[in-house]
């Protein structure tokens, strides 16, 4: 895994520059270590993002068989454990060691992320919504908890609110990427609900767009929107240095759900993503809405 790293030893500054580059090279619908975060916090978030992004790439490496992908993830996990013992060599782990040691971040949420990536290699469908929630517990919720810890928040009540938003973001990403995930032989819509709405896995794999599919996706979207609102009080509890970022992420997720609805849930014909106009509106809403839990209106700009 480290064969592509030419330097034998990176300084902390060089390692943070490396993870910043990894972050900038990947497109995301939602802000990742954006310019609205305090400059001193950004490198820490980028170190965690680079760690997770690289592991995710291992899990998605289609040119390799599942066993090899799992071996790469096992090696990444070994390096994570070494990192916590001060033995980091890879620039991502050098930056990560600086982050977790300075901020007293435990290894568990990072290990949880790796558990989710391994599950992506081993499991390609979910029988029910509880199974999917369990996946989100490892794939998404640790990210929000890590961000809160970077800003000094370790209250379990804050974590629970963050979990709601992060789970909603993960689910939103699933609904946005139904077609993309099918190409990877993955289905993140509960099997029992697919059948209960009169649809079928076979129809889904064939991109059949009909009334049963629309009813199925309407249910998914409405439930996910409720999760966003269950976590919507979190920005009010944190200081302003994190508040705007949380609101941008929240409005970004809500806007994506609205766009999927506007297309009548048809994510097969064209990939759904936020436009530049959508992002401007999201930013303005983030600035002017204090209590996002009271946000109910939908602008046409959300839906374009």
Image: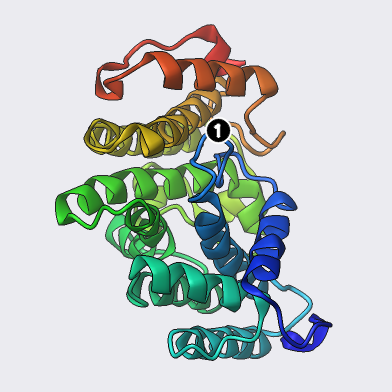
Q: Secondary structure at mark 1?
A: loop
Q: Is residue 179 left or right of residue 30?
A: right
Residue that appears at 49% across and 31% down:
252
Of residue 192 and residue 40, the one placed in the foreground of this image is 40
Instruction: Please report the residue visible at 64 percent of the width from the left and 33 percent of the height from the top.
Output: 273
Count of all numbered marks drawn on residues in the image: 1
User: In which quadrant is the N terminus drawn?
Assistant: bottom right
Q: Which quadrant holds the C terminus?
A: top right
**Coordinates of residue 144 in the picture (x, y in percent):** 37, 53
Query: Is the residue 86 above or below the residue 106 in the image?
Result: below
Residue 89 placed where, x, y %? 64, 86
Q: Which colour scheme appears in the figure?
A: rainbow
Choose between 139 and 109: the one closer to the eye: 109
Q: Position of residue 18 (x, y in %)?
A: 71, 65
The reply, left or right, for residue 119 in relation to residue 76 is left
In the image, residue 128 above or below residue 5: above
Question: Which residue position holds label 1?
Answer: 210
Residue 25 rendering spot, x and y as whole percentages: 75, 53
């Amino acid at each position: 895994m480290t064969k592509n790293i030419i330097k034998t030893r990176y300084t902390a500054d060089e390692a943070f520059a490396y993870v910043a580059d990894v972050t900038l090279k990947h497109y995301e619908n939602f802000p990742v270590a954006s310019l609205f975060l305090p400059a001193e916090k950004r490198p820490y978030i980028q170190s965690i993002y680079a760690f997770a992004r690289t592991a995710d790439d291992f899990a998605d490496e289609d040119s390799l068989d599942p066993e090899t992908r799992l071996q790469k993830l096992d090696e990444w996990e070994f390096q994570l454990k070494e990192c916590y013992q001060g033995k980091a060599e890879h620039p991502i782990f050098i930056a990560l060691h600086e982050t977790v040691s300075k901020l007293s971040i435990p290894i568990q949420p990072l290990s949880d992320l790796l558990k989710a990536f391994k599950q992506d290699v081993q499991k390609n469908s979910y029988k029910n919504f509880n199974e999917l929630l369990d996946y989100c517990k490892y794939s998404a919720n640790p990210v929000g908890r890590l961000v809160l810890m970077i800003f000094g928040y370790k209250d379990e009540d804050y974590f629970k609110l963050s979990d709601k938003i992060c789970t909603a973001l993960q689910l939103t990403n699933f609904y946005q990427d139904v077609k993309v995930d099918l190409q990877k032989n993955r289905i993140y819509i509960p099997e029992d609900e697919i059948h209960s709405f009169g649809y079928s896995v076979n129809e889904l794999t064939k991109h059949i767009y009909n009334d049963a599919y629309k009813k199925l996706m309407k249910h998914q979207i409405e439930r996910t929107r409720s999760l966003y609102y269950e976590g919507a009080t979190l920005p009010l509890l944190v200081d302003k240095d994190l508040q705007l970022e949380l609101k941008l992420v929240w409005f970004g997720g809500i806007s994506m759900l609205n766009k999927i609805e506007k297309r009548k849930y048809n994510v097969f014909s064209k990939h759904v993503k936020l436009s530049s106009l959508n992002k401007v509106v999201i930013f303005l809403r983030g600035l002017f809405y204090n209590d996002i839990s009271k946000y109910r209106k939908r602008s046409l700009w959300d839906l374009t």
